[in-house]
Structure formats: C-alpha cells, structure tokens
Image: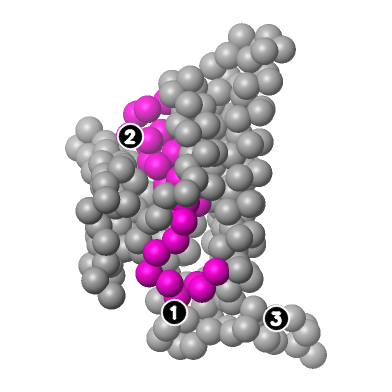
Amino acid sequence: MQPRFLGQLGLADAVTVTNAALGFAAAAVAAADPTLAARLVLLAAIADGLDGVVARARGGTPVGDHLDSLADVASFGVAPAVLVHAVARVGTDGSPAATAVTVGVPAMFVAMAVVRLGFYMLEDRHAEETEGVQTTLAATILAVAYLAGITDPAVLLAVAAVFTYLMVAPVTYPELYARDALVLGGLQALAVLFPEVGGRVFPRSLLLFAVGYLVLAPFIYWRDG
C-alpha cells in the first residue's frame, strides 16, 4: 500500500523535498566541513530552480507551493545560518559577547527568512516581482562568498546581518529572465563541482553575478512583462 502523502506528490515535489534534504545535509556538515556545506547550499539552490522547470513541464500539485516554502526554510534559512555560525564560532574568542553575536545574527537571519517566506506564500507565486531580497539569493551569496575565499567570520556575520534586514525590506526585486536564470544555474553547478579551479574562478564569477543582481536589479532590471 502506497503511503497516503507520498501518493499525492508529483515529480516536481520530489525535487522540492530533495532541496530540503540538501539543506539539512548542509547544516549537518557545516561545523566539520564548511566548504562542503556551502556547496550543498548551492546544490539546493539548483534544485530550487529545477522544481519550477519540472512543474511547468510535467505539471504541479496543490501542495507544491507550500512544500517549496517549507524546503526553502531549511535550505536558505537554516543551512546558511548554521554555516555562518560554524565559521564564526571557530574564529571568535568564546566570550559571552562574541557568543551572543555568533548565535544572535544567524538566529535573526533564520527568523527573517521564515517571515519573508511566510508572507511570500500569501502572494501571487507567478508574479514577476517580489518585495524583499529572495532567501535563495541571500543564501547563495553567503555560500558562494565562502567558496570564493571570503572566510573572515566578521565579514560573514556582517553580510548575514545585512540580509536579515534586506529579506524584509520594502525593496522590489524582479524575477530573473529565463536566460539569466540559466546562466546563474550553470555557474552554480560549476561552483559546486569545481570550487577551486582557476583560482576559484567559478565561485567568484557567481558571486559577482549575484551581487550585481542584488545591487542593480531594483533599479535597472525591470521586466517588460
């Protein structure tokens, strides 16, 4: 007999729950191997984009959008926060003040990711723009920054703190054009597979692309419909 819930899932949903599993795996290995954790976060981001492609090609299910936001909490809320905490904890002196920062900033990152995703579930999921920085983008920048060689705990904590605000800020971001999403996905795959090749060229290229979108998209990337 097929389990009740699994029988109602489609192929796109399977990709979505794989995204969530990758998020857990990233969090689980962050303390022992931050580089692997960062690569798993990027792999989860690839899965996050792929589930939409599969849903458009094969059809989605009524539960798909809900699963997507739940998976995003794990992969783009909890996982990058644990990664930042793991790196920062090793690089601090262990004082109460340092501990408060290394725990507090990642905790607030998770909290604001949950808030953003909660409100996102109430919006039109097919709209061409959204308010606040996407959790996927925030997680991608944190993960790829580490792979690109930005491993200073203070810098990663500062970036996470900035995203804590930006995820719920009243700034409108357009969805990526398909061509740009394809470029982003390709760079993500190369950064996952070959993070150190050519002087970290793939993570650094992805970081440049992602930061460019972060800074410029609200002003000069508007879609034409």
Dot 1, how many residues are within 10 Å of its Cα: few (below 14), some (14-19), or many (20+)? some
Where is 22 relative to 30, above or below?
A: below
Q: Earlier in the sequence, mark 1 or mark 2?
A: 1
What kind of element bears circle 2?
Answer: loop
Count of numbered labels shown in the rendering: 3
* Residue furthest front as drawn: 170
Q: Are marks 3 and 1 in contact (CB under 8 Å)?
A: no
Amino acid found under the numbered disc labelled 1: Val
Coordinates of residue 11 in the picture (x, y in percent): 53, 81
Dot 2, how many residues are within 10 Å of its Cα: few (below 14), some (14-19), or many (20+)? many
* Quarter occupied by residue 30: top right
Dot label at residue 6: 3
What kind of element bears circle 1?
Answer: helix
Q: Are marks 1 and 2 in contact (CB under 8 Å)?
A: no
Dot label at residue 148: 2
- Between tags 3 and 1, which lies in front? 1
Coordinates of residue 99 in the picture (x, y in percent): 67, 18
Segment colored magenta: 123-151
Dot 3, how many residues are within 10 Å of its Cα: few (below 14), some (14-19), or many (20+)? few
* Residue furthest left as drawn: 198
Coordinates of residue 50 in the picture (x, y in percent): 42, 70
Q: Disc 3 to disc 1, how far (Cα)? A: 17 Å
Where is 176 relative to 63, above or below?
A: above
Q: Who is closer to the viewer here, 81 or 203?
A: 81
